[in-house]
Each structure stands twice: as C-alpha cells, then as structure tokens.
C-alpha cells in the first residue's frame, strides 16, 4: 500500500515542503529573530537599507544554501557507497572513510604543520580516498567486491 505511486508522490511533496519550511526557518532564527513574513520579503524584495534584510542577505542566506548543498552531497555520497558495496546499510562513516579523512588532517597538522583550510581540505580528500581504496581493495582480496562499473549501474539508471 505504501509503495503505490500516489503515496510516493505525497511523500516527496511533503519532504520538499519540509525542506522549504526549514530553509525559511533557518533564515529567520538566529541572534536576532526575524518574522517569517519579513524573511520572505527579504528574499523577494531585498532592501539594502533594512537591517533585517541585510542580516539575511549577508550571513544567513549563504549559511542556509551551503547547508542544503552539503546535505545533498552527503546523501549522494551515501548512495554511491551503498551502490558500490551493494549494502543498503553502508555509510561512509561505517566504512572508515570519515576516519581516514580525519586521520590525514591530524597527521598534516601534527607532522607537516599544515595550517590552512585548503590544506586541510586536500588532506581530507586524500585520506578519504586512501581509506575508501583500502576498504575496496580488502573486499576485492576477500572476493566480496564487484567491479565498480557494475556496482554503479543502479545509480545511473
């Protein structure tokens, strides 16, 4: 019953509405509370002389948009990891990808004295790649891994 197209459509619309409501709420809530009506007005008719519009436009809007983009990227990473491992419970943190990224960041700070955010980012990418590659290599040695081209076919369709 819950697998019918109507229920899936209603669920999708409900989730989209919830994201929009939470997005507007994140713009309204902060050090200075701004009414939702004025938040909406700041998005539709921006007035640079209005202090509340200035707060929304300069700090809160970018924070909210970045949060949505990061959430979408984390969801996509989860889908890729689940497709690659063919495990619906697989997640980057369970496979050690997050731990590999953090280990490389701590190594870079401690031993290589990296102190820039871009340096942290590149070492995190490298650590995540090494950890993910190591897990995939160990799966291949155990005969549990399938070729990546076959693993990502469900994602691509």
Image: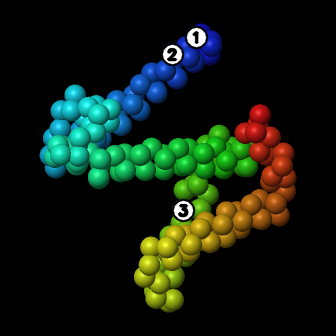
Foreground tag (2 vs 3): 2
Q: Residue 25 is drawn in which quadrant?
A: top left
Label 3 close to label 1 by CB (< 8 Å): no
Label 2 to label 1: alpha-carbon separation: 6 Å
Left or right? Give the position of 30 relative to 15. Answer: left
Q: Position of residue 3 (x, y in %)?
A: 62, 16
Q: Residue 44 is drawn in which quadrant?
A: top left
Label 2 close to label 3 by CB (< 8 Å): no
Does residue 36 appear in the picture of this structure? no
Q: Which residue is mark 2?
A: 10
Label 3 to label 1: alpha-carbon separation: 37 Å
* Marker disc for residue 28: none
Q: Quadrant of the C terminus?
A: top right
Q: Which residue is mark 3?
A: 98
Q: Secondary structure at mark 2?
A: helix
83 versus 9 height, above or below: below
Left or right? Give the position of 134 relative to 8. Answer: right
Does residue 126 appear in the picture of this structure? yes
């Amino acid at each position: 019953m819950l697998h019918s197209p109507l229920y899936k459509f209603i669920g999708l619309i409900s989730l989209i509405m919830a994201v929009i409501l939470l997005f507007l709420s994140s713009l309204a809530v902060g050090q200075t509370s701004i009414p939702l009506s004025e938040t909406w007005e700041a998005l539709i008719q921006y007035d640079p002389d209005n202090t509340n519009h200035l707060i929304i436009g300069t700090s809160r809007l970018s924070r909210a948009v970045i949060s949505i983009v990061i959430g979408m990227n984390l969801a996509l990473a989860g889908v890729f990891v689940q497709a690659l491992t063919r495990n619906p419970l697989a997640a980057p943190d369970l496979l050690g990808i997050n731990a590999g990224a953090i280990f490389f960041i701590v190594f870079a700070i401690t031993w290589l004295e990296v102190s820039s955010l871009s340096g942290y980012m590149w070492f995190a990418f490298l650590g995540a790649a090494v950890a993910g590659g190591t897990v995939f290599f160990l799966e291949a040695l155990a005969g549990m891994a399938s070729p990546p081209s076959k693993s990502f076919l469900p994602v691509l369709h």
